[in-house]
Image (cartoon, helix red, strand yellow):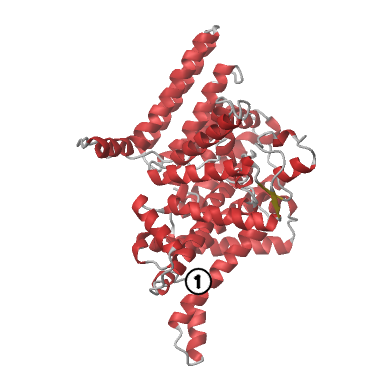
Amino acid sequence: MGFNSFRFILLFLPMLLAGWHFINKTGKHAVADVFLILMSLYFYYSFGLSFLLVLLVSLAVNYGLSALMEKMSGSGQKRALKVIGVLFNLALLFYFKYMGFFVDNINALTGAALTTRQILMPIGISFFTFGQISFIVDRARGDAPHYPLLQYMMYTVYFPKLIQGPIAFHKEMIDQFNDKSLRTYDADRMAKGIMSFIIGLAKKVILADTLSKIVVYGFKYTYYLDTITVIVVMLAYTFQIYLDFSGYCDMAGGVSLMLGFKLPTNFNSPYKAATAKELWQRWHMTLSRFFIKYVYIPLGGSRKGKIRTIINVIIVFVLSGLWHGAGWTYICWGMMQGLLVVWDNLGIVGVKESELHTAAVSGNNNKKAKYLLRQTPLLTIPRALGNALTFLMFVISLVFFGAQNMTYAFQMFKRLFFWTYPGFFYRTAENLEIAENYVFRQLFSQLGMDSAQIVVYMVTMIVLLMVSAIVMTRKNTQQIIEDTTFDKKTIAFLTVLFIWSFVSLSNVSTFIYFQF
């Protein structure tokens, strides 16, 4: 039961909102908490009972360790429990997500014939496991109290963030849960929540799912693609993955706002970034801050010299790649992103209006620019050029992210960088058979023209240009919502957008990041 399903929109969400706001209106906040916990557990149960059991075991073990920390006064004992907690969470993640990858590589290296039974990975395990790790580490540091059970359960199983993030820290959510003023129905919050949900739904079912028709076909038939087709497939994938993931986050944030709570922002127009570092300050922001707080800073951050800084950055991005998936393609993707960030940190090329440029102009007095390994760049380029280069390198890196395996990835690179044109674009673009094509086909037919191939090319280019214009020029969803006045025109537009999206749900698809 994903957010983009009839069952969620027509049954689950109305029942949830009605029950939540009615119970809170009576002042029975503890009952409302139990109601929200049960609804969240049911939501996760809809993906499978075994998944729910894994979630409950994870919750029970981590809460139990927190309770033990409460009884211990020695810092050494708490550190020991922290190690146990982190190892438990990582072991859980390793078993369900990486066991098969690990065994396959052992077999390849040693020639062994080890086998594992088919392990079904619980949806969203990477997200709720990282949330648990952040809590256990903060408990050991003394940065988190031993919360009452209901509060901790609400934080852990809160369904808007449960299966695909964002990765919310305990304090930022539990503080909101404890704020009684947020339990009062607020029409403005509800309107903004509905708008965020509709925008996210449209991103997913109208744009991302349309582009996926090209993407799925392109990555399946990599060996047959020509250079132009590879470019089109990669552009489609670049926009699809952003629209799919940010669309989910918009929907999650919208549902949360309807309940009265605000989730942390996970995307801030990442394709407007002018450097790789800036891109990672805008893309999957909650994952970036998790790695900075719990990996990069404990490793020494940028405090232990240039070489150590470079190593720490590479470690963080390799782990980020591995977090996204159990495969060498994801590791290579993470490594490439890490090297791009290291290149930014070297400060050889600066981009106007970026941190490096600001630091150079201000004499490097900006505290945010301490990561720089060079005070002044050898070359400074316009922001527009930096934006184009950053976007290009991200598109290229996604070859690793989307390829079935390393062999397919190298084949995609070969097709991309060594010009070929066997004419496979038409077959690939033909998969973009959307209802709007009918109008164009009829128009060309009336003009007495052979319409098939012309329409396919035309519609494909129109879709790509339209999506590019939306993603690269529009404000992000949070900015749009804050700047919106809910007048008649806005309401009419949102109504049409929702109906269009709702009708498109007949071809319901899963979100890309469900697998992570």
Query: Which class describes the residues within 10 Å of circle 1: few (<14), some (14-19), or many (20+)?
Result: many
Outermost front residue: 378
Residue 119: x %, y % from top left = 30, 38
View extreme (right): residue: 362
- Residue 335 in the image: x percent, y percent? 48, 42
* Quarter of the view holding residue 364: top right
Element type at mark 1: helix
Q: Quadrant of the C terminus?
A: top left
Q: Quadrant of residue 201?
A: bottom right
Q: Position of residue 429 (x, y in %)?
A: 44, 71
State the residue at coordinates (50%, 28%). 132
Q: Kindly identify the residue that appears in the image at 73 percent across and 55 percent down.
A: 484
Taking the image as shown, residue 407 lies to the left or right of residue 390, namely: left
Horizontal side of residue 236 vs 345, given as left or right: left
436 or 23, which lies in front?
436
462 above or below 208?
Answer: below
Q: Residue at x 53, y 61 (%)?
A: 207
Residue 265 seen from this side: no
> Would residue 305 be found to the left or right of residue 330 on screen?
right
The answer to whether residue 10 is left or right of residue 220 is right
Report the residue at 60% width, 16% height from top.
142
- The number of discs equals 1
Q: Amino acid at mark 1?
A: Thr
**For mark 1, what is the residue?**
460
